[in-house]
Image (tube, rainbow, N blue to C red):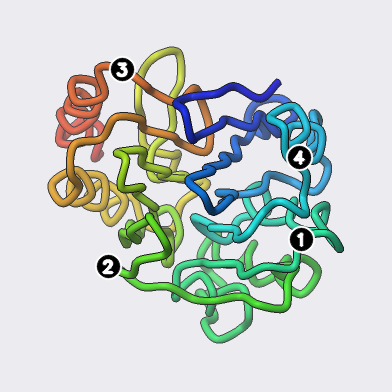
Amino acid sequence: MAEQLQPDAWLLDVGLVRPFDTNSYLVDDGTVTLIDTGLWVNWPSLRSELADAGYKPADIDRVLLTHYDLDHTTGLGRLAPAFDGPIYIGQRDYDLATGGFDPPLCHHKGLFHRLVRPFFPIAGDDIRPVRDGDRIGSFTVFDTPGHNPGHVAYVHEDGAAFVGDLVWERDGTLTPPVWLDSYDMDELRASIANFWSRTPRISTLAMGHGDPITSDVDRRYRELLAAVEDPAMQA
């Protein structure tokens, strides 16, 4: 069921069961923006979650993708043909999805992406790669590589940060994604720290997996920073 996080933002719970539970988000600040789209087989469906929030696919003006993973991108196809607006994704993941960048065959996640991308392209005709610092309406793009080479976060000017798989939330605790689902854990830990040092005060931390955080964000993120700096976690 869709949940209103703040006056202009909704959580759309599009997923199955862990680890396939995925969050999408909708922001209506005068322009309707959908962030991530879940799997193509979501239950509840993306359309039903949009309807629960009072929207339909034709209302969406643009889609922001945090990265190219099937549980964040393939729900796009469920919006067709009503949605035909621009789709934004980090430059390196745009290259990954379209064949401009070939990850090593010997890399666990790189091999997976090379196998699936011919069958699961990003569904849309107007796909726009973005880079660190780009502005998309009221959103600013932050490069946050590690989970994927071109992973990005989008921070809205009202303080809501949509961070995809930069971090996960499990049982009230923030944690990095696991090694098996990531490209480079050292780069991911660096992105977690770098993102926090560069962003203004965050009022809502909205991740792709887990419950978004709408209070005490600073303390909980600093606990995550302390954990990722722990040598035991880096082993």
Depth order, front residue of 140/180: 140
Disc 1 secondary structure class: loop
Q: CA distance from mark 1 to mark 3?
A: 33 Å
> Label 3 neighbourhood size at 10 Å, few (<14), some (14-19), many (20+)?
few
Nearer to us of marks 1 and 2 is 1
> Label 4 neighbourhood size at 10 Å, few (<14), some (14-19), many (20+)?
many
Q: Which comes before the other along the chain, label 1 or label 3? A: 1
Q: CA distance from mark 1 to mark 2?
A: 26 Å
Which residue in the structure is indicated by mark 1? 83
**Which label number is shown at residue 215?**
3
Residue 88 place in picture, x, y as percent = 53, 67
Q: Is residue 115 above or below residue 18?
A: below
Q: Is residue 139 above or below residue 214?
A: below
Quadrant, the C terminus: top left
> Label 2 neighbourhood size at 10 Å, few (<14), some (14-19), many (20+)?
few
Which residue in the structure is indicated by mark 2? 133
Q: Which comes before the other along the chain, label 4 or label 2? A: 4
Quadrant, the N terminus: top right
Q: Which comes before the other along the chain, label 3 or label 4? A: 4
Q: CA distance from mark 4 to mark 1?
A: 13 Å
